[in-house]
Image (cartoon, rainbow, N blue to C red):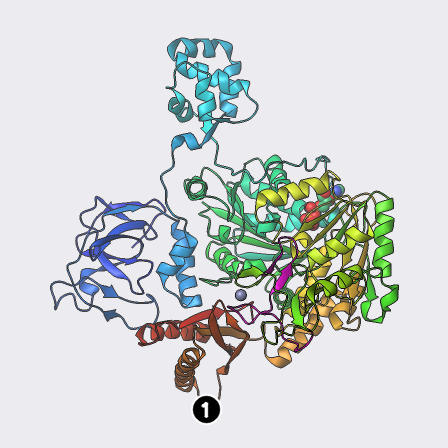
Amino acid sequence: MTITDSATLQPANPDQICLVAIPGISIELSYRVDSLESIPAVGSEVLVEVGRSKRRGWIIGYQNKSEIVDFSKKKKVDHQIALFPGNNFESKTKHQSDLKPVLKFKPACLQSQTQLFQWMSEYYGVTLAEIYDTALPQRVKIPKTFFQVQITTTGKKFLEDQSAFEKFSKRSPAQAQLLTQLAARKTPLDQTVLFATVKKKSGLKALIDKNLAAYLPYIPAIGPTLIEADTNSEIKLNSDQINAITKINVAIDEQHFNPFLLHGVTGSGKTEVYLNVIEHALSQGKSALVVVPEISLTPQLLSRFTKRLSQTPVVLHSQLNATERWSAWEALLRGDVRVAVGARSAIFAPMQNLGLIIIDEEHDSSLKQSDGLRYHGRDVALKRAQIEDCTILLGSATPAFESLLNVERGKYSLLELPERATQSTVPKIEIVNFAAIRKKDCPSENISPELFSALKNTLEQKQQAIVLYNRRGFSTYLQCETCTTVISCKHCSIPLTLHQQGNFLLCHYCGYRTKIIELCPICRDPKRTLAQTTENDHETSAKKNAEPKIGQLRQRGGGTERVVEELGILFPAARIARMDRDSVSNHKILNELLGKMHGREIDILVGTQMLAKGHDLPGVTLVGVINADVGLNLPDFRSSERVYQLIAQAAGRAGRGNHPGRVIVQTFQPNHPTIVALQTGRYKAFARYELTQRKELFYPPFTRLLRIIVSAPKLENAVSYAKKVAEFLSQFHTSKQTAASNPLQIIGPTPAPIERLRNRYRLHFLIKSNSVRLVSELARSLSEWQNTIKGHKDTRMALDIDPYEML
Ligand code: ADP
Ligand code: ZN
């Protein structure tokens, strides 16, 4: 059957039934469409009856009634069940009842996307309903007044022709008045504002039909301050940029699957390349999709896109409400807008005639969804580009090692921007061995003499500094001096972090929050009185290793809050702000903070990884990194790669303006390969070294990984379920084993590094295999098997293909 992008096709064929995927139902149900005037396209959203309730689902395919196994035998076949259509899984039939009609349908995505969803269902081993449910936004009714209106170029020209306009005014005075009002404004208007300026409200639709005015695609405001970006709009592209743009443009014209890796150092003008190639795609009548980390969707970036492109992009991010999201979606679906910029899930945006996909910061782990459907945005994007025959551009200053290997293997074409685009250069990283510094020489617990004097110097020069400490809070944990007990979360096997601002202990994994305690809950040693110890310790608290105490409990480690306090003592006149998940909970606060940095209202900005991402802050000349070792020794094969990327990105914030930058990195492990590599700046060599190790240890990208996490409120339940999983795995393994090969390696069950999380005990398995197909098949079989397991109500099993989290 041929399918078009419009939702309607030929008249309904009474012999055909459609298969509908419905969230929450692990099988697909069949429905009649013969009561409809025309057949909805695959991918259409439908309203159907399930039992007595009406449910939302999506049409995933059609079948002739005669093809259904049991249909001829039993007259009343309803539910044709194929868990994963198109695979070699047997169809099963479930309880039968009357075949019911589809009640209503609407287009929800483009036909080209249904192929992508099919692939995702197979690759991630989950039902199509789950894919549709994740990928497509909720449909809501959008009031017309929701949209702003503006005059079009045709409208402006029309107004210039005085005699024609006079005639028009006589014939249609209401329309003429509306048009004049629109012309009088430079910016688009809310409809309520527009109508307040005229006598009659009629005529707007007529103006829009004549293309004299247009509804503006909904562009969600992302913050209060639109920072003026690109004042130097007359940019003369450098030869590296021109080379990259030329090659990409040729690829766009060729309309083939054409993946590029744009490896450009921080500030090398990658965004400039993006803007140029997007414009080229638009000029060819194609659309372009841009995915950036959520945190980079700042007014600065968006205004740069809005000002420079001939089409205003829609913006898709997590803080849109349902109306905003659906209206943006519809504008794309209709083809009214041809550029979309958004965070991870924007990869599902319904782009008509897609010509280009850009994944900025392609190494960023936020591209991987960490719960629900654990897809990787970059992998999905690559598949989409392949299906839609389009160009895909992965951009980063520190590409994922996987991507570098793909260049080596000839899968991606490499484009390089080795120099900064402006006069500045990428600063060299200076390493400070914190372990070698004597206590008495340290100005404060976390600040080395080197960083102190660099900060002092920066402040004297009236320049700005960024201090990265990739750990939130004031102390990492509280420990009893008498019995060494560490105060942990009630729900997780994670130490609670002390947050002094707000005076509470917080679990960074489940969000559990409690009052600060002063007595060890285990030994309750009352030897020392609280008042004494607290006072004495606070006096010396700025000194290295004199970790402050609360009552009987010693505060271990540190975090952003602690660094803010120390800097406050060391530089009482400086204006210091903090940027982490605790202080920045939404885009509004983020933008205010960035606005203050731009406006030089902040001297030192202390923060976590949040401040390392993409921000272009020309006043920053110094970047300090406290404890570069955070995250370095995690049981995760990507930990070194991530730490390098984080610190290199942070370093890239320094010296982007007119003054050269300095980067000081404090570490306890100056000889760690990651730190040595950072110092020399030889990223590719470091990647090669790490990849060799991964190859030896059989880790991605040299193998596929599937992580299985089993959890239950009671440890014994988790263990007994894990045993069943182990049996299943072993059977599966045996069935695939041949004399010549051992296609799967099964590790586990072992307790997960975080043994208890949100009141659940956790065990995990790690499956390694060279076969992509086999891993997907295993995931699929596991979820099918899971549905058949009885008597484990409280137990959950999560499957993570290509996992990024190992804890
Ligand atoms: P990246 O995305 O690689 O970090 P940007 O595209 O944001 O880099 O560019 C960094 C800065 O350099 C921006 O202020 C941008 O306007 C400027 N820039 C980019 N290309 C050029 C160029 N060819 N000449 C001068 N300035 C440029
Ligand atoms: Zn917790």
Does dot 1 land on a helix, a strand or a loop?
A: loop
- Within the image, what quadrant is residue 310 found in? top right
- Residue farthest toward the bottom in the current orientation of the protein: 739
> Bounds of the magenta span?
481-505
- In the rendered image, residue 96 lying in the magenta stretch gets the answer no
Label the magenta part by its dominant secondary structure: loop
Residue 605 in the figure: left or right of residue 208: right
Depth order, front residue of 668/347: 668
**Residue 265 in sight in this render:** no
The image shows residue 156 at horizontal and vertical percentages of 52, 20
Depth order, front residue of 506/719: 506
**Residue 12 in sight in this render:** yes
Q: Is residue 792 above or below residue 264?
A: below
Task: Please state which amino acid type lies under the numbered disc 1.
Answer: Ala
Depth order, front residue of 510/265: 510
- In the rendered image, residue 494 lying in the magenta stretch gets the answer yes
Q: Is residue 44 above or below residue 174?
A: below
- Within the image, what quadrant is residue 681 found in? bottom right
Q: How many marks?
A: 1
Q: Residue at x 35, y 52 (%)?
A: 43
Q: Which residue has dot 1 on it?
A: 739
> Badge 1: few (under 14), some or many (20 or more) residues near its Cα, within 10 Å?
few
Residue 56 in the figure: left or right of residue 179: left
The image shows residue 144 at horizontal and vertical percentages of 39, 31
The image shows residue 408 at horizontal and vertical percentages of 65, 67
Q: Quadrant of the C terminus?
A: bottom right
Q: Is residue 65 above or below residue 174?
A: below
Q: Quadrant of the N terminus?
A: bottom left
